[in-house]
């Protein structure tokens, strides 16, 4: 099947790419539903389910694509998928929401999530830049910092609960409303979800590589554009729906949290499985991600919200970035 997808015609490769994205997204949804139900049956608190399993769900497409790419030694696709997804989340998802309605920024996002996001990108730049390779030890360091981040989130959520407060999070709310299914049904959802993610990731990588080969695009460019946008579409759709309901209070925090997850967990896991060589293009893109992150952080500090004008600037900057990577 892999060989067929990698050598089929362009129209068929595009069909496979769309089908792969569908399997990724639906597989992630089913996996989260099944695993959350099992966790609830074992009386795991909704806070922990929300900040681990549910939060992981939005980044499972990126995880599957990057891990499959690393296994197939298509390392530039793995790295560019994560960096491209992070830039898309920052500039398009949040920018689009800000245009629809100004995005309020929580203090925890300003003081904890933004600095940690920039730190994660800087860590990727340093560890990847030294020796132009992300080795297994470097990747293990990412996973350690990811565990620290998740541990901090859970500790803060539990502390807020004890003090009678409430740590706002869409993931926690989703976990609280998650239905508990029978164990056989939960296990079926878990297996079907994993199968969908694995198949979807495999199909996306093979079809994207085929498209890149046929139209003369590099794997880096395909990862930064087609693949990263496809794996980030669920976040965009969810955020747009929330914006239409005027419920975007947590949109920025969720996007930044997803970016932290993508670098520390997705690349950490992919790198432990298969070390990833870096290209100079990867270094430049990570530097652009850091600069854009600092810019949006600055926008967020002004009146603790991102205005419509700033949202327009973000979308324009993303278009400029896409033009740049297509021309280089």
Image (cartoon, helix red, strand yellow):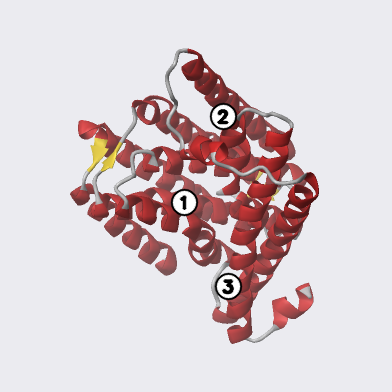
Instruction: Kindly identify which numbered label has been placed on residue 47.
Output: 2
In space, the residues marked 1 and 2 are separated at their CA atoms by: 34 Å
Q: Nearer the viewer, residue 129 or 304?
A: 304
Toward the viewer: 218 or 24?
A: 24
Query: Looking at this view, is 241 or 134 the one in front?
Result: 241
Residue 129 visible here: no
Q: CA distance from mark 3 to mark 1?
A: 26 Å
The mark that comes first in sequence, 2 or 3, is 3
310 versus 228 height, above or below: above
Q: Residues within 10 Å of mark 2 (few under 14, many from 20)?
A: many
In the rendered structure, the answer to whether residue 168 lies left or right of residue 41 reads left
Q: Quadrant of residue 118?
A: top left
| Residue appearing at x 41%, y 48% in the figure | 288
- Residue 207 position in % (x across, y down): 64, 73
| SS under mark 3 | helix
Q: Badge 1: few (under 14), some or many (20 or more) residues near its Cα, within 10 Å?
A: many
Q: First in sequence, mark 1 or 2: give its number.
A: 2
Dot 1 lies on which element? helix
User: How many numbered discs sit on the rendered protein?
Assistant: 3
Residue position for label 1: 285
Q: Residue 238: horizontal and vertical position, in percent?
A: 44, 54
Q: Measuring 31% from the left and 35% from the top, which residue is drawn there? A: 105
Where is residue 170 shown, x and y percent of the image? 46, 40
Query: Which residue appears at 78% of the width and 76% of the height?
Result: 3
Any part of residue 234 in sight: yes
Q: Nearer the viewer, residue 140 or 20?
A: 20
Q: What residue is pinned by disc 3?
A: 18
Do residues under tags 1 and 2 come within 8 Å of each other at their CB atoms? no
Element at badge 2? helix
* Other-residue count near label 3 (Cα within 10 Å), few / some / many at <14 / 14–19 / ≥20: some
């Amino acid at each position: 099947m892999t060989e067929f997808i990698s050598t089929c015609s362009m129209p068929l490769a595009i069909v496979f790419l769309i089908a792969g994205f569908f399997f990724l997204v639906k597989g992630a949804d089913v996996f989260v539903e099944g695993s959350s139900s099992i966790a609830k049956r074992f009386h795991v608190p909704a806070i922990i389910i929300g900040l681990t399993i549910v939060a992981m769900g939005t980044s499972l497409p990126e995880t599957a694509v990057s891990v499959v790419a690393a296994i197939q030694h298509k390392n530039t696709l793995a790295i560019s998928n994560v960096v491209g997804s992070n830039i898309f989340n920052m500039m398009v998802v949040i920018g689009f929401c800000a245009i629809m309605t100004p995005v309020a920024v929580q203090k925890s996002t300003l003081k904890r999530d933004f600095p940690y996001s920039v730190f994660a990108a800087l860590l990727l730049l340093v560890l990847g830049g030294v020796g132009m390779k992300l080795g297994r030890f470097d990747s293990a360091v990412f996973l350690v910092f990811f565990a620290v981040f998740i541990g901090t989130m859970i500790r803060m959520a539990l502390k807020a609960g004890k003090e009678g407060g409430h740590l706002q999070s869409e993931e926690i709310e989703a976990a609280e409303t998650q239905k508990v299914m029978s164990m056989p049904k939960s296990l079926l959802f878990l297996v079907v979800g994993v199968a969908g993610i694995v198949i979807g990731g495999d199909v996306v990588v093979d079809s994207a590589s085929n498209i890149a080969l046929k139209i003369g695009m590099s794997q880096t460019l395909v990862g930064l554009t087609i693949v990263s946008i496809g794996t980030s579409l669920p976040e965009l759709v969810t955020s747009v729906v929330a914006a239409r309901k005027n419920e975007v209070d947590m949109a920025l925090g969720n996007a930044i949290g997803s970016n932290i997850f993508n670098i520390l967990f997705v690349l950490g896991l992919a790198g432990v499985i298969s070390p990833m060589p870096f290209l100079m293009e990867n270094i430049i893109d990570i530097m652009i991600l850091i600069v854009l992150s600092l810019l949006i952080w600055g926008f967020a500090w002004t009146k603790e919200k991102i205005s419509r004008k700033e949202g327009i600037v973000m979308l324009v900057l993303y278009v400029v970035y896409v033009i740049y990577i297509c021309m280089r």
